Amino acid sequence: MIPGNDFSFYDQVLDALVLVGATPSRFGGGAVTLGRYFQMARNSSEQTAMEMTKWFDTNYHYLVPEWSAELALVPDTRKVVGEFKEALALGILTRPVLLGPVSLLLLGKGAEGWEPLSLLPRLLEVYKLVLQELAAADAEWVQIDEPCLVTDLSSDARAAYRKAYDALSGSPVKLMLTTYFGSLGDNLDLACSLQTAGLHVDAVRGRGQVMEAAGRLKPEQTLSVGCIDGRNIWLADLDRVSALLNEVMQLRGVGAVQAAPS
């Protein structure tokens, strides 16, 4: 599987905000130009840039979403659909990557104490439209990243995940729900119950969760095993990787397993 929509001029979270029409109104309205994109990312004489914070436990940063009731939430699919079509014209069928709706909300801050998760119903309508456009462009799979599933979740956040993927389960494309940066822990059952076509787990930091996930998914679901360490430059221990994959395939069958970076 070759990923798409994984290139960014600055930050993948900012890209997601542009995609769903959730860029702060203080930077202006309408379609986001490259100039306005960088204005949100870097201070200018006209406006203070958006706040930055660490992307989980990496040395990378992301721009913190600013959630409020006034956001337009009108999708702008020029980048994601354009890059998919560009690759397809070259004979390459990619799997577009999207930051999932619940993680996108949880990674942001509400204006004056406003609760970001209250935007979920409106945001889901946007995601449905994005997935429909990708399906119309002949996408078969979409990778939907929900890294917040490896964190401690409130009861409201857990309910939001169930609501979100119940709404997106009728999507015309197959969804690979992707988790990383650790084990799912207490959220393993939740992730397996969301009825996506596939689930990706981090098998480097969370090797112990792999067989649990393999046993909980339905036969028709694909398990993506993140068995190649995406955090270092060193060669993988292929004997160890092979042993893990063989164990998973014995339980689930060859066609229901994918090997992937962590």
Image: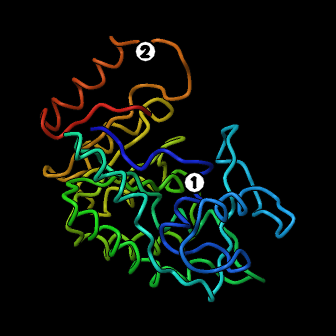
Rendered image quadrant of residue 35:
bottom right
For disc 2, the marked residue is 236
- Measuring from the top left, give residue 25's x and y in whole percent: 68, 80
- Measuring from the top left, give residue 115's x and y in whole percent: 65, 81
CA–CA distance between discs 2 and 1?
A: 26 Å
Is disc 2 placed on a helix, strand or loop? loop
Rendered view: 76 above or below 71 = above
Residue pictured at 30% horizontal, 55% vertical: 142
For the C terminus, the image quarter is: top left
- Measuring from the top left, give residue 61's x and y in whole percent: 69, 47
Pick the residue in front: 214 or 21: 21
Rendered view: 218 above or below 1 = below
Q: Is residue 183 left or right of residue 250?
A: right
Pick the residue in front: 167 or 125: 125
Q: Mark 1 Cα within 10 Å, few/some/many (few <14, many 20+)?
A: some
In the image, which disc is placed on residue 151? 1
